[in-house]
Amino acid sequence: MSSHFIPNIGPAAGRTTAEAKQRLKQCGEAGLFRHAVAEEFGGLGDDFNSLCNDHELLGKQTRDPGLVLAANAHIWGAIFPLLRFGSDKQKSSLLPGLVSGELIGGHAITEPQAGSDTQAMQACAVATADGFELNGCKRYITNTPIADLLVVYAKYEGVISAFLVRHDDPGVTFSDGPTVQGCATATMGDIILSDCRIPADRLLGKAGMGSIMIHLALELERAFIFSGIAGVMQWQLDEAISFARTRQVKGAPLSDCQAISHRIAEMKLRLETVRLWVGKCADHCDRKKRIAVESAATKWYASEAFLSSSLDTVQIFGTRGLEGEHAMLVQDAMAGRLFSGSTEIQKNIIASMLGMGS
Ligand SMILES: Cc1cc2nc3c(=O)[nH]c(=O)nc-3n(C[C@H](O)[C@H](O)[C@H](O)COP(=O)(O)OP(=O)(O)OC[C@H]3O[C@@H](n4cnc5c(N)ncnc54)[C@H](O)[C@@H]3O)c2cc1C
């Protein structure tokens, strides 16, 4: 297990698109996108445990869940689907740029009328003489305003397929919004496909494989996005401990109050449990084992743990906890319950793996 990431990226100074792009590119320059990618594609040829180490460092150094989200959308939404399903030509032309951070990617599944229920998506593709024509609207797509290309899912002959859409393709707009309050340092937007024409070689994988591709991409995203957030949770814990030790109440440190020290003990347990779950997913992936239940459990547990610890941090700090960063992390944690599939969907996945439900 080794760590290559040089953590020279600090907390976000602002929330501009230019800064978001710059920070993501810095992650690429530091090698963050090369983990668990074979050397022949510009990767480090290392394992998922190394990836987790560097992602946690990134989270701790930047305490920026938006940047963590943007990096994970890029990695699991674009790099890994290309690695797994791309043609030789797609891999050789796109992977070097994506792993270096020169090109920014992501994946577009959600639509205004189709979120958790991906089968309800309305975006569609029809064959043309030399490729495909895409129509539809994707919403809440991370990295859209700064993306060079996105893996866009749309129905072709009634079945979901994946297409590589570039920001400068005719008939597509990568727009800057609507955005949400949580993870606001990540950029987000709509993709408007209006008779968008792309050549035939932009089909990713085989026609009709989109559902399984979504499934596999989200399985990885759910498993590993909280390795970065664990770094943020470590920072929260350090801050809470330091404040509780120094803040005086009735002539004694706040940490003498059991109500406070118990909150801190709970934060520690949550953090270590997140690490255990993420580590279990990494171990499974390093052994080439599937992580269907493990990734759903990790996403469910870790997103709820991050929200609970964010609320605890604000409570320990009292009203000053509402002044800035700690309060913003509560919003970020709320977003964490929704992106990559909500808590309810993770419960559904686990239940269905146990033979429950329809
Ligand atoms: C910060 C952020 C970044 C995002 N980035 C991306 C991205 O890069 N790409 C992308 O495609 N999408 C992205 N999304 C969208 C996200 O994946 C969806 O919002 C999510 O899948 C939920 O869909 P929805 O909001 O339409 O809610 P809905 O599906 O309408 O669900 C509404 C509520 O009902 C619950 N619910 C829905 N179905 C069920 C069910 N069967 N059983 C029990 N409860 C259910 C949900 O849990 C939720 O609480 C992002 C979202 C956020 C917040």
Image (cartoon, rainbow, N blue to C red):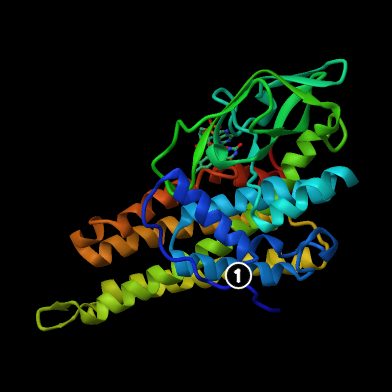
Nearer to me, 27 or 303 = 27
**Which residue is found at the position 53% from the left and 66% from the top?**
58
The number of numbered discs placed on residues in the rendered structure image is 1
Residue type of the residue flagged with mark 1 = Asp
Picture quarter with the N terminus? bottom right
Residue 99 versus residue 189 in the image, above or below: below
- Horizontal side, residue 37 vs residue 64: left or right: right
- Horizontal side, residue 131 vs residue 328: left or right: right
**Which residue is found at the position 54% from the left and 63% from the top?**
228
**Which residue is found at the position 88% from the left and 34% from the top?**
206
* Label 1 Cα crowd, 10 Å radius (few <14 / some 14-19 / many 20+): many
The x and y percentages for residue 120 are: 66, 24
Picture quarter with the C terminus? top right
Residue 192 versus residue 98 in the image, above or below: above
Nearer to me, 120 or 188 = 188
Nearer to me, 132 or 64 = 132
- Horizontal side, residue 236 vs residue 121: left or right: left
